[in-house]
């Protein structure tokens, strides 16, 4: 199958093509070779399996929540159980799925290749990251099995320290461990980008995917330790009852809020920035054009990271922070919204005078652009002080963050998985099924979360097990959407798994993309390159690609 | 508002009747809704713009009609445009939102105060006249009402969506919010900060009455002492009158008229005496020693409930003379067998 | 490691380079490896600063709010022991720095001696800390159920002056001393935990140094551990004055 008028997909002749016998998957055999690997690509695959596993557990909890919310009465499960549902959904989705999703899978796999080097700076620490993640996941499952935790993923004190007798400590320590997994991943990326770029690979020749991960890594490295110490303080307070957050003993519950949100706000940028990197790559490839305003997109990633550290108290506008403090944080929140807007316009204008095709990754990218715009703009509602008073702690917030995280980040993750699947596995997935899944996901998503904006303005609080009957119709719509969404997410599991054995052979560069990863075999060799490349052209240089194709192709081995 | 009131009413009522929009039942609600419609307009415009660009370019430059891409580096002019215009709009939002915020969290001086105590899992409303309500709040129209709120345990949040007001209810310190109801009716009260098992059941109803009906309700539900009267009782029974007797030789400062005044402390600080200060001074006296006095006041942490503290604060707010204080002292010290409550009668 | 065992082209025709045995093959040069390792350690120390930062922030807040409780609580700490510990830790750091030098000039014997001295002084620090913690336990100053404020409400009479050694606190302020002690144990405890980890690593490094691993051109582990050890030292240099020296007037 080769490029036609409507697709740039260019597969090798299936009668003769085979997946290369020697690649990182076949290099060694046996479980231990995977569990003790230092190869960033194998670690990425280990992560892919783990996070997919946790995604479906978190998703199951979401399904249960939506099922309960079909009726206004609290009739499916007891209140304590429902509270555990949304807590586990939040904890798993935030810490065990969203934070590592793109960086630990696609980032791990691609960053060394994109930079023209053989591995990340610290392969053993990379493996350690995965083990820490797995231990954290096991601890979360343990706390689930032992009875669950119902603090909400935000661990608000004094509820979590003095008023609940569920497995707060186990979960808190689990997240502590997961935090270090994230810190080490970020640390690895930063050192790799600084020290291991191949000759000729200047900062401004790096793909924008790497820029986004660099920015996200700064956040991971500087923000996550604060979460770590905050969780330790919560655990100590539970165990010893000292009162650092307890007002009856002179402590300040607002101190917890400041410490918690100091990480958890940058955390949302840790989650979204890598996804934005994916979108840059996908939009560029399927428009056959360099990303419009490369420098602007690169700097806006770093700007988001920087500004992202200074807006945390916008989660606390109604909690009694001083009016002046509220003013400062609201202003900074408005500023942090601007770089994201810049990116959306840059991607949109990448389409201008391009040659656009609509393969699955591009469909997900379009979905991202629309849904992230809505999600991001609704963030502006919440950054506006007066508006936040009415909207905070309602379903408007739930809708806002699901738009950016699910409509944005998850779509970007799926875009990335579909875009680099042929590179990572050597196989192509069935295009018609994947397009169907993308469309189903988009429809399901909108049906699930658009009604929640309305519910939020109506005043329906979040984390409610029961609600006034006049909110039922909107809730039913939302649950219906969730069902469709679930189908949309199950489909990829099925056809991606199928493609591993039966999918057509992909070849080195099925998308005819630029980028070092497309100039090596699919799947890559363990050492990525037979010789370290020398980067002598800009990123997204389609003219160079055209020129190379006319002179024998881009494969460098 | 720059839009015809008739049109506005029509829009809002139509939206409300289709169960897609809350009622506007307070003076601040239209202001909130105006900002909301602006932001909604901004969002729709923004999304439409992005969609228009994406769809137009996708169709116009799809591969079948535009097989070769033209490489474009960028455009500083465009970058500047889509940096400055969104920034401008967001800054307008910032100013508008900030003004609204200050409006909602700065009560007018003639606001009537009602205390709200939140605890797992119910709301207690305490009117100054002594009316107590659970998960309910009766208020008159046309009168600014300030809610002074505190939690007895964990974080809660008091929300009346139809009034468009909400504030966190925190353990250990008072938080306030005000509103003026415009339309008689009943409206939801929600707790919007997750507070444990029965968070979704910590709901109630605010009943807005016309001023006459409200007066009738007050008279009908008064059963017992007002908050201040209760406070006076506590003031005597907890022994406060022993030091704060108001005489020249008293060990503690004179509290008559202290509410609302500026007080100098031994630390050199000057503080404004409000509800929060009074509550804090009772619980953490060491940090609130009036200049010229010794730090001998014991703490009452753990000995008084939040309700009791509210009673004391209400009492002190209205305390103008120490006559009755000294009366209760005399009575307490006398050898007579009369009940000590004699000084605390209506 | 799997990828090192993969068949590898003879990578360097341009210059005949014999790598040190500890060379990791994903690095092109030893210099790249060393720089990456060093950069990685500095970044890790940055995360440690953010980690301790949370505790310092809490300290900032509560010292500001409850200064009157922090003063007598801090005065309970033993300044001579704390000062001795500061000197001990600085000495330990000094020996570590000498160890790095010894590794660089390839003197194995000296390296081992300096590492051992670093460890001994580090252990001495922990020993003094144990003594201090034990004293706190005996005086019921460990936060939690057994915490007692009696010493702050009724300070013991100073034999020399016949008056209480410090101003007695009211009960509500005395209760805030528990927050000081929580911060004391939290911060010094976290610091001690980092020292214990460091001592464990030191023992491992001593064993490897004895084998000669670090005196034939490969000094990165010693250098990077040195960075870590000095960081732990610097944290103590902040903890000591902030915790021990609140409102001390030794000449009065």
Image (spheres, rainbow, N blue to C red):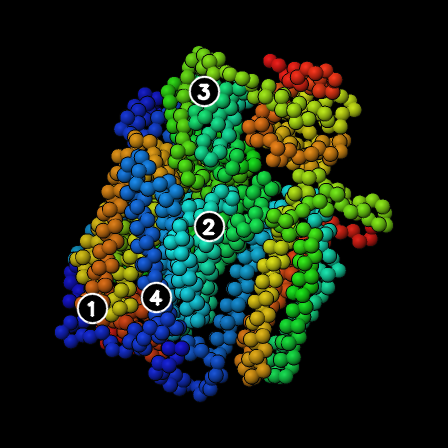
| Disc on res. A46 | 4
Q: Does any portion of residue A525 appear in the rendered image?
A: no
Query: Eyeballing the image, is A300 above or below A189?
Result: above
Query: Numbered disc 2: what chain?
Result: A
Q: Do the residues marked 3 and 1 share a common chain?
A: no
Local packing at callout 4 (Cα closer than 10 Å; few below 14, some 14-19, many 20+) is: some
Q: Cβ–Cβ below 8 Å for labels 4 and 3?
A: no
Q: Does any portion of residue C108 appear in the rendered image?
A: yes
| Disc on res. B139 | 3
**Closest to the observer, B42 or C18:** C18
**Mark 4–mark 3 distance (CA, rounded to whole Å):** 61 Å
**Mark 2–mark 3 distance (CA, rounded to whole Å):** 41 Å
User: Which element carries disc 2, helix, strand or loop?
Assistant: helix
Q: Earlier in the sequence, mark 4 or mark 1?
A: 4
Q: Is residue C83 left or right of residue C11?
A: right
Residue at the spot of label 2: A168
């Amino acid at each position: 199958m080769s490029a036609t008028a409507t697709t740039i997909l260019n597969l090798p002749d299936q009668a003769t093509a085979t997946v290369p016998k020697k690649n990182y998957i076949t290099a060694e055999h046996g479980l231990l070779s995977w569990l003790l690997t230092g190869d960033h690509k194998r670690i990425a695959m280990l992560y892919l399996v783990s996070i997919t596993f946790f995604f479906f557990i978190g998703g199951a909890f979401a399904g249960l929540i939506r099922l309960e919310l079909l009726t206004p009465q609290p009739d499916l499960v007891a209140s304590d159980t429902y509270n555990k549902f949304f807590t586990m959904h939040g904890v798993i989705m935030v810490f065990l799925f969203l934070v590592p999703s793109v960086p630990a899978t696609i980032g791990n796999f691609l960053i060394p290749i994109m930079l023209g080097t053989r591995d990340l700076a610290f392969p053993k620490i990379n493996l350690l990251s995965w083990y820490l993640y797995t231990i954290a996941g096991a601890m979360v499952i343990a706390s689930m099995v032992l009875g669950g935790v119902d603090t909400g993923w935000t661990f608000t004190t004094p509820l979590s320290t003095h008023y609940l007798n569920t497995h707060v400590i186990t979960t808190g320590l689990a997240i502590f461990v997961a935090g270090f997994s994230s810190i080490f991943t970020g640390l690895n990326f930063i050192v790799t980008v600084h020290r291991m770029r191949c000759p000729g690979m200047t900062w401004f020749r790096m793909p924008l995917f790497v820029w986004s991960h660099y920015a996200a890594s700064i956040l991971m490295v500087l923000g996550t330790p604060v979460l770590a110490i905050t969780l330790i303080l919560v655990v100590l307070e539970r165990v010893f009852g000292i009162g650092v957050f307890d007002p009856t003993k002179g402590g300040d519950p607002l101190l917890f809020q400041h410490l918690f949100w100091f990480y958890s706000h940058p955390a949302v940028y840790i989650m979204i920035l890598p996804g934005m990197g994916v979108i840059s790559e996908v939009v560029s490839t399927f428009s056959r054009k360099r990303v419009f305003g490369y420098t602007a997109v690169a700097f806006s990633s770093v700007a988001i990271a920087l500004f992202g550290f200074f807006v945390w108290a916008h989660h606390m506008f109604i909690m009694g922070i001083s009016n002046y403090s509220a003013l400062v944080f609201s202003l900074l929140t408005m500023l942090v919204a601007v770089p994201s807007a810049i990116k959306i316009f840059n991607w949109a204008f990448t389409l201008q005078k391009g040659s656009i095709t609509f393969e699955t990754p591009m469909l997900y990218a379009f979905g991202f652009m629309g849904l992230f715009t809505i999600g991001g703009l609704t963030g502006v509602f919440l950054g506006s002080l007066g508006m936040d008073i009415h909207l905070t702690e309602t379903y408007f917030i739930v809708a806002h963050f699901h738009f950016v995280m699910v409509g944005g980040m998850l779509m970007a993750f799926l875009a990335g998985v579909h875009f680099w699947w042929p590179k990572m596995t050597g196989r192509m997935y069935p295009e018609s099924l994947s397009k169907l899944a993308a469309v189903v996901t988009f429809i399901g998503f909108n049906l699930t979360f658009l009604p929640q904006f309305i519910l939020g303005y109506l005043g329906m609080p979040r984390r409610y097990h029961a609600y006034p009957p006049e909110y039922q119709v909107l809730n039913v719509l939302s649950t219906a959407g969730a069902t469709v969404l679930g189908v949309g997410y199950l489909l990829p599991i099925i056809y991606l798994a199928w493609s591993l054995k039966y999918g057509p052979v992909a070849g080195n560069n099925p998308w005819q993309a630029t980028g070092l990863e497309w100039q090596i075999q699919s799947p890559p060799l363990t050492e990525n390159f037979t010789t370290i490349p020398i980067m002598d052209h800009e990123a997204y240089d389609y003219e160079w690609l055209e020129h190379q194709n006319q002179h024998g192709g881009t494969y460098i081995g | 508002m720059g839009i015809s009131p008739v049109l506005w009413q029509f829009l809002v009522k139509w939206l409300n009747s289709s169960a897609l929009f809350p009622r506007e039942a307070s003076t601040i609600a239209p202001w909130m809704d105006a900002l909301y419609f602006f932001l909604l307009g901004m969002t729709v415009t923004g999304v439409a713009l992005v969609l228009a660009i994406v769809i137009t370019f996708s169709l116009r430059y799809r591969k079948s009609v535009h097989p070769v891409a033209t490489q474009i580096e960028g455009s500083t002019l465009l970058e500047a445009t889509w940096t400055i215009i969104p920034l401008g709009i967001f800054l307008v939002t910032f100013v508008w939102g900030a003004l609204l915020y200050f409006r909602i969290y700065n009560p007018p001086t003639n606001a009537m105060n009602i205390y709200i105590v939140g605890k797992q899992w119910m709301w207690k409303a305490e009117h100054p006249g002594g009316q107590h309500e659970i998960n309910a709040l009766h208020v008159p129209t046309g009168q600014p009402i300030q809610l002074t709120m505190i939690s007895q345990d964990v974080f809660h949040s008091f929300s009346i969506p139809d009034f468009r007001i909400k504030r966190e209810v925190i353990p250990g310190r008072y938080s306030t919010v005000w509103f003026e109801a415009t339309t008689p009716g009943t409206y939801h009260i929600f707790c919007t900060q997750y507070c444990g098992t029965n968070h979704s059941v910590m709901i109630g109803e605010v009943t807005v009455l016309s001023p006459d009906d409200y007066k009738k309700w007050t008279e009908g539900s008064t059963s017992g002492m007002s908050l201040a009267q209760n406070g006076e009782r506590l003031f005597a029974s907890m022994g406060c009158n022993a030091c704060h007797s108001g005489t020249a030789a008293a060990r503690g400062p004179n509290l008559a008229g202290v509410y609302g005044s500026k007080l100098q402390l031994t630390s050199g600080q000057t503080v404004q005496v409000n509800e929060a200060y009074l509550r804090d001074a009772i619980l953490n006296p060491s940090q609130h020693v009036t200049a010229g006095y010794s730090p001998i006041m014991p703490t009452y942490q753990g000995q008084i409930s939040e309700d009791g503290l509210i009673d004391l604060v209400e009492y002190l707010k209205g305390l103008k003379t120490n006559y009755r204080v000294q009366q209760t002292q005399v009575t307490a010290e006398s050898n007579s067998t009369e009940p000590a409550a004699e000084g605390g009668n209506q | 490691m799997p990828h090192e065992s993969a068949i590898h082209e003879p990578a360097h025709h341009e210059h005949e380079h014999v790598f040190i045995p500890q060379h990791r093959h994903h690095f092109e040069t030893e210099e790249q490896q060393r720089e990456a390792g060093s950069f990685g350690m500095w970044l890790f120390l940055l995360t440690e600063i953010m980690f301790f930062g949370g505790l310092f922030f809490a300290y900032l807040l509560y010292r500001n709010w409850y200064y009157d409780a922090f003063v007598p609580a801090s005065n309970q700490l033993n300044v001579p022991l704390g000062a001795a510990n500061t000197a001990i830790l600085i000495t330990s750091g000094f020996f570590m720095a000498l160890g790095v030098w010894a590794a660089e000039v390839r003197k194995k014997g000296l390296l081992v001696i300096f590492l051992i001295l670093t460890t001994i002084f580090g252990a001495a620090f922990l020993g003094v800390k144990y003594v201090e913690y034990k004293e706190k336990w005996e005086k019921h100053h460990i936060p939690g159920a057994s915490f007692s404020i009696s010493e702050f409400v009724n300070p013991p009479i100073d034999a020399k002056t016949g008056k209480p050694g410090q101003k007695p606190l009211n009960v509500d302020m005395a209760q805030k001393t528990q927050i000081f002690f929580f911060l004391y144990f939290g911060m010094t405890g976290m610091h001690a935990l980092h020292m214990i980890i460091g001592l464990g690593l030191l023992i491992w490094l001593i064993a490897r140094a004895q084998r000669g691993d670090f005196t034939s051109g490969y000094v990165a582990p010693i250098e990077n551990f040195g960075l870590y050890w000095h960081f732990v030292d610097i944290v103590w240099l902040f903890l000591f004055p902030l915790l021990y020296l609140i409102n001390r007037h030794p000449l009065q």
